[in-house]
Image (cartoon, rainbow, N blue to C red):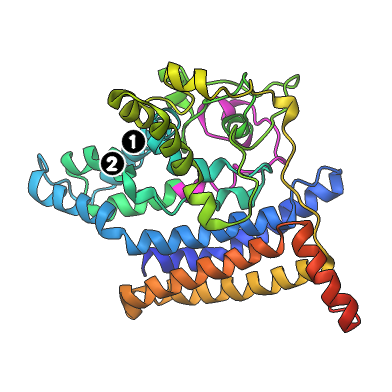
Amino acid sequence: MTYTQIMVLATPAFLALMAVDWWVGRRRGRDSYRLHDAMSSIGLGMVSQLANFLTRVVGFGIYVVVYQEFAIWRLPADAAWVWVTGLLFYDLCFYWHHRAGHRVAFLWATHAVHHQSEDYNLSTALRQPATNWVAGWVFYLPMALAGYPPAVLATVGLIDILYQYWIHTQQVGRLGWADRWLNTPSNHRVHHAVNDEYLDRNYGGILIIWDHLFGTYTAERDDVPCVYGTRLPLHSWNPLWANVQVFAATAQESARATRWRDKLLVWLRPPDWRPAEVALRYPKPTFDVRGVVPYDPPTARVARSAAVTLFLATLGGVAWALWNAHRIGDGWLAIATLLAILALSGVGWLGAGPATSRRFEAVQANDGGLA
């Protein structure tokens, strides 16, 4: 069974757990879901899975070559200790990949997609970038050099990412001793927050001990409620713009710099770094967490119904494409990916606010009601 087929089989469980998460939140008076935000996050997950398969030669393919040509030795794939240590090794590599994704601007341009949602719930876990192939694979090459077989990498990587699904919830509180050792919902809420007290902390995947070891751990505080999103708000449901927004903003900063050194450093320094001359000519307001207002344009009921219908149809089509990805070939899968992006852009457009709503209200009035 392929990786993409496993993800297709896991999708009903993901959706069922989202329903439980939503129901518990509603019962407690702490509903953390908004329809268009959740569809946006799940849609970005669809596009990410399609892109990951199309670009597998860049990440997994390079790992295989490095393992075959440069591994110091070949570890036995049938030894339990190889799998256990492989999972620990992968989680350590993930920590540094994740940390670099917040502290190196061109890596943040990819990872920011996962943080763009101003909600925090299980749908946020599925909100993944389509550009992970750009450089993320580099952080796992030490495992290839150490002789971990590609099958071990693929399996422990799947375990690591599946574990992180359940921690994207506001309905599970602190867990005592587990919060000291594992990445838990409380620890990961801190990671997703844009508050000054929490920014760029808690990078662990499964284990939070890496953050304790390397000085990046911060505990959730009762007196500082987490505020979610990014400091450069997306304010869009469009999946294409979600994936290019930070790249475009960083490219603009680079173009504004007059020195070639600064043009390059804009991509390599932390995302909040700006050349002095650019900061002087193009000042930005100081970020204030109290000014964060979630993007939530009002939509007509008929527009919401149309968006949900198109979204569900796209979800079914993408599930079919991912299940058959190894059979239909990359050309057809690329066409499926383009169609998915177009369809999800349509879903985003339907939820984009008053202008769209007014058009659909007019249709609804003329047709006697379509909702």
Give the image location of residue 175, x and y in percent.
Answer: 65, 31
The answer to whether residue 322 of the structure is visible from this angle is yes
In the rendering, at what x and y percent does residue 126 appear?
Answer: 55, 53
Q: Is residue 16 left or right of residue 67?
A: right
Tell me if label 2 and label 1 are in contact, CB under 8 Å.
Answer: yes
Residue 252 as seen in the image, left or right of residue 185: left
Q: Which residues are magenta?
A: 161-185
Residue 119: quadrant of the picture: top right
Q: Which mark is residue 93?
A: 1
Query: Residue 178 versus residue 371: which sits nearer the camera?
Result: 371
Of callouts 2 and 1, the N-terminal one? 1
Q: Residue at x 87, y 83 (%)?
A: 367
Could you tell me residue 156's position as x and y percent?
36, 48
In this rendering, the answer to whether 369 lies above or below 186 is below
Q: Look at 26% across and 54% down and name the residue there.
A: 58
Residue 128 appears anywhere in the view: no
User: In the image, what residue occupies the spot 75% across and 37% down?
Assistant: 293
Predominant SS along the magenta part: loop
In the figure, 358 relative to 195: above or below? below
Query: Residue at image x 70%, y 68%?
Result: 307
Q: x, y (%) of residue 36?
A: 70, 57
> Badge 1 local density, few (<14 within 10 Å), some, or many (20+)?
many
Q: Which residue is mark 2?
A: 140
Question: Which is nearer the eye, 70 or 360?
Answer: 360
Counting every numbered tag in the picture gives 2
Q: Amino acid at mark 1?
A: Cys
